[in-house]
Image (cartoon, rainbow, N blue to C red):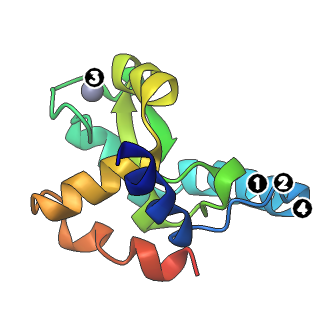
Amino acid sequence: MEKNRIDSHKDWVDIRKDNAHVAREREKARELRNSPWWKARLAEGKCHYCGGAFNPEELTMDHVIPVARGGKSVKSNVVPACARCNKTKKHFTPAEQILNEMETSGELSPADQGWKEETK
Ligand SMILES: [Zn+2]
């Protein structure tokens, strides 16, 4: 049962390893980090996952769908995350599961809801 649930999520992203994609998206992430848009996100001082308040320098850019799994460095796929959430997420949970749960429960902001389109 649980296995089927996870398998069904494979349709959402292309999980083939693609080194050119990874290199390109990492470079785009660097540019995005220097953008006024990202600096404004950091200045809000809020972790996307736990909703906690942090100093901008405590927040890191997290790819909701990891670059290595086909995620892109686009505004709808990067969020500020505190160190704890960043670590917890990598450790435990496929990004697709988090997103699906958030979407189901209506927690995704309108800006984030295009993520499935952008992974196509
Ligand atoms: Zn957090």
**Element carrying mark 1:** helix
User: Which sits in the foreground, 85 or 34?
Assistant: 85
- Toward which corner of the image does residue 116 lie, by quadrant? bottom left
**Helix, strand or loop for disc 3:** loop
Q: Secondary structure at mark 2?
A: helix
Whole-percent x, y for residue 42 in the image: 34, 40
The residue beneath circle 3 is: 55
Q: Is mark 4 within 8 Å of ligand 1?
A: no
Q: Quadrant of ligand 1?
A: top left
Residue position marked by numbered label 4 in the rendering: 20
> Can you give x and y, in whole percent of width and height, for residue 13 in the image?
58, 67
Mark 1 touching mark 2, by CB under 8 A?
Answer: yes
Pick whichever of labels 3 and 2 is earlier in the sequence. 2
Which of pointers 1 and 3 lies earlier in the amino acid sequence? 1
Question: Identity of the amino acid at label 3?
Answer: Asn
Q: Position of residue 77 (x, y in %)?
A: 46, 60
Label annotation for residue 56: none
Classify 10 Å Cα crowding around label 2: few (below 14), some (14-19), many (20 and above). few
Measured Cα–Cα span from mark 4 to mark 1: 11 Å
> Which residue has dot 1 on it?
27
Q: Earlier in the sequence, mark 3 or mark 4?
A: 4
Q: Amino acid at mark 4?
A: Ala
C-alpha gap between disc 4 and disc 2 = 5 Å
Residue drawn at point x = 48 percent, y = 41 percent: 62
Specify the label residue 23 is tagged with: 2
Count all numbered tags in the image, as a single digit: 4
Can you tell which of label 3 and label 4 is closer to the viewer? 4
Front-most of residues 81 and 120:
120
User: Is the distance from the Cβ of mark 2 to the nearest ligand 1 atom less than 8 Å?
Assistant: no
In the shown orientation, is residue 37 left or right of residue 90?
left
Q: Is residue 92 placed above or below 44 in the rendered structure?
A: above
* First reached walking from the N terminus: tag 4 or tag 1: 4
